[in-house]
Image (spheres, rainbow, N blue to C red):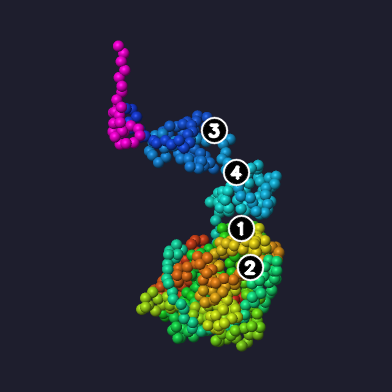
């Protein structure tokens, strides 16, 4: 009589699901094949496709993964989907082949509306307009874009395939000679970790004359704009070693390190910088001098340095291409990086000259040290305060830095400006063409400055983080009580010669530093680190260079004749045949 025998059931003593590897009979033919977990979210495709027309005869079958990516170029796995059996050594792991050509992935979420226009019959209008090459396919341009499957790409400028874009290469601020010796290389992330608390400074002396700030500029709005005037005044920007006052202070041994607020602010805000810069360092005995080169980056103001897509200069002609070499160079665009920098420098100077009342002045202890008796043109409002900061970590350390700081005006009131009461620094932000490349997504100031000032300020803090940080550090070093920032725009976006003043903001430097997240302790830590590094070197000349394309600074030893040779036009060179420093 037929009977039914219950087969043996192998329990899993390990507590997991499925058979235990220790209890599988020897005769079980799948004993050596590991178990691969399976999730319902995994996407299953064909185990083998014998009708594949991709031209690859190596079919993907069970246990035979293809050596090429079966998804093909430009295809990506769905979000959250993983390859079957990924993370385990499984004979069932495979890459499924190309799906049918009709497959497409569409983002169902609506894209944010484009400011200034929309798409009409296959042609884009407004900001960042793009033209369609095929239906549903567009090249990226402006804010947002379209992918090659017809779906709208969400997000801002960092959208689809931004990683493919060619990175722009900047040129170094100074030509580096192969004979120079690189002594040290410091990454920005190391600088950002430094910290040094510094006490209040000691005022050594004051020079110059400052005019009273015209408070009527605080009441300017976009409806009561004023034209920016060309004011012919003299303002000196002398480097450290050429300052006659510092030369006198050196003989009195008031400090070990000497510099100016413009040079020191660049060093203190180095982790924020993007554009290249360089500082010339001279060691004589136990003294250090931080200098700038004539015509270097310290003499101009940057524009949108920290923007995601900053203004760029046109690429120079290729000397190896005879066609480009013989071509007549086109005049630079008014929205190129160099043109905008010169325009911003012009605006800053004239706004500071215009926003003061020259009939109300306050004289400092001594006259302007750079204004000689042969000068006939009138001086601009400028006061110099020479201050000494103690950078010693312990009481036994004697590390002091003497800084020449500048103030632009004062606010009349109780107290003597010579003692630091009511001192003001004046700066200006400039708007060019909001639709031009490099505008950084800035809103139109004329329509947003009065109603949405916060949005304008936030955009400027993002696009000009380094510039605003340097201005704030300079104001804190000078001991200014107020910082005035003018908002100045072109009268016509296509004309960079006529400008109008739309508004003026007033803030305390310490409060503004907190808004910008500027740490003065971190800045002093950077200064002390560079000072200690240079003090360990022998006497000579050095140059600290910010890499034009990397977040790193390098210290080079250069010959004493570097940066001093001048030709008939006054251009400065680094020396024809520099000798390697010891």
Q: Residue 487 carries which label?
A: 2
For the point 65% across and 80% down, the residue is 357
| Residues at discs 2 and 1 in contact (Cβ within 8 Å) | no
In the rendered structure, which disc, 4 or 1, sits on the residue that comes first in sequence? 4
* Residue 536 in the image: above or below residue 15: below
Q: Distance between the residues labelled 4 and 3?
A: 27 Å
For the point 67% across and 49% down, the residue is 118
Viewer-nearest residue: 559 or 512: 512
Viewer-nearest residue: 354 or 252: 354
In the rendered structure, which disc, 1 or 3, sits on the residue that comes first in sequence? 3
- Report how many numbered discs are placed on residues in the image: 4
Q: Residue 53 carries which label?
A: 3
Q: Distance between the residues labelled 4 and 1?
A: 23 Å
Q: Quadrant of the C terminus?
A: bottom left
For discs 3 and 2, the disc positioned in front in the rendered view: 2
| Residues at discs 4 and 1 in contact (Cβ within 8 Å) | no
Q: Name the residue under label 1.
A: 441
Q: What element carries label 2?
A: strand
Res. 267 in view: yes
For the point 48% across and 40% down, the residue is 81
Q: Name the residue under label 4.
A: 151
Q: In the displayed image of the protein, which residue is found farthest to the top? A: 1
Range covered by the magenta-colored residues: 1-27
For the residue carrying disc 3, how many other residues have a C-alpha within 10 Å: few (<14), some (14-19), or many (20+)? few
Q: Where does the image place residue 528, in percent across and percent down from the top left? A: 43, 72
On the picture, is 184 further left or further right than 510? left
Q: Where does the image place residue 230, in percent across and percent down from the top left? A: 68, 74
Q: How far apart are marks 1 and 3 (CA)?
A: 46 Å
In the rendered structure, which disc, 4 or 3, sits on the residue that comes first in sequence? 3
Q: What element carries label 3?
A: loop
Q: Is mark 4 on a helix, strand or loop?
A: loop
Q: Where does the image place residue 522, in percent across and percent down from the top left? A: 45, 68
């Amino acid at each position: 009589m037929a009977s039914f025998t219950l087969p043996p059931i192998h329990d899993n003593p390990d507590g997991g699901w499925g058979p235990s590897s220790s209890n599988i009979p020897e005769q079980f033919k799948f004993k050596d094949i590991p178990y691969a977990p399976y999730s319902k979210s995994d996407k299953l495709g064909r185990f083998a496709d014998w009708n594949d027309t991709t031209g690859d005869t190596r079919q993907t079958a069970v246990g035979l993964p293809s050596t090429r990516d079966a998804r093909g170029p430009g295809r990506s796995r769905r979000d959250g989907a993983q390859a079957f059996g990924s993370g385990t050594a499984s004979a069932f792991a495979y890459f499924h082949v190309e799906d049918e050509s009709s497959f497409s992935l569409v983002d169902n979420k609506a894209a944010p509306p484009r400011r200034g226009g929309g798409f009409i019959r296959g042609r884009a209008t407004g900001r960042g307009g793009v033209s369609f090459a095929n239906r549903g396919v567009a090249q990226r341009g402006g804010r947002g874009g379209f992918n090659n499957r017809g779906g709208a790409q969400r997000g801002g400028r960092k959208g689809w395939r931004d990683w493919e874009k060619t990175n722009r290469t900047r040129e170094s601020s100074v030509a580096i000679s192969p004979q120079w010796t690189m002594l040290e290389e410091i990454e920005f992330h190391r600088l950002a970790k430094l910290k040094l608390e510094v006490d209040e400074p000691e005022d050594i002396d004051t020079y110059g004359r400052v005019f009273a700030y015209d408070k009527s500029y605080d009441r300017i709005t976009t409806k009561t704009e004023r034209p920016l005037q060309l004011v012919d005044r003299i303002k000196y920007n002398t480097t450290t070693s050429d300052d006659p006052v510092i030369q006198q202070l050196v003989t009195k041994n008031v400090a070990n390190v000497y510099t100016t607020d413009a040079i020191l602010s660049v060093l203190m805000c180095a982790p924020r910088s993007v554009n290249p810069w360089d500082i010339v360092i001279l060691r004589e005995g136990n003294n250090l001098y931080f200098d700038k080169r004539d015509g270097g980056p310290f003499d101009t103001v940057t524009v949108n340095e920290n923007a995601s897509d900053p203004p760029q200069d046109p690429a120079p002609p290729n000397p190896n291409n005879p066609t480009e070499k013989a071509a007549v160079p086109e005049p630079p665009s008014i929205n190129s990086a160099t043109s905008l920098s010169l325009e911003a420098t012009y605006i800053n100077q004239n706004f500071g000259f215009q926003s003061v009342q020259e009939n109300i002045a306050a004289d400092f202890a001594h006259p302007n040290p750079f204004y000689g008796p042969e000068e006939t043109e009138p001086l601009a409002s400028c006061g110099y305060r020479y201050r000494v900061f103690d950078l010693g970590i312990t009481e036994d350390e004697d590390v002091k830095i003497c800084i020449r700081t500048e103030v632009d005006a004062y606010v009349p009131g109780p107290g003597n400006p010579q003692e630091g009461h009511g001192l003001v620094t004046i700066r200006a932000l400039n708007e060019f063409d909001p639709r031009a490349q490099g505008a950084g997504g800035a809103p139109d100031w004329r329509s947003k400055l009065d109603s949405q000032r916060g949005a304008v300020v936030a955009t400027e803090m993002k696009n000009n983080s380094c510039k605003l940080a340097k201005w704030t550090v300079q104001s804190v070093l000078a001991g200014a009580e107020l910082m005035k920032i003018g908002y100045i725009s072109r009268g016509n976006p296509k004309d960079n010669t006529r400008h109008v003043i739309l508004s003026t903001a007033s803030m305390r430097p310490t409060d503004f530093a907190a808004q910008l997240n500027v740490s003065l302790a971190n800045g002093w830590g950077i200064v002390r680190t560079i000072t200690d590094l240079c003090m360990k070197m022998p006497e000579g000349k050095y140059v600290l260079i910010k890499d034009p394309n990397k977040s790193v600074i390098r210290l080079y030893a250069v010959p004493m004749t570097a940066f001093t040779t001048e030709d008939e036009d006054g251009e400065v060179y680094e020396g024809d045949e520099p000798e390697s420093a010891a």
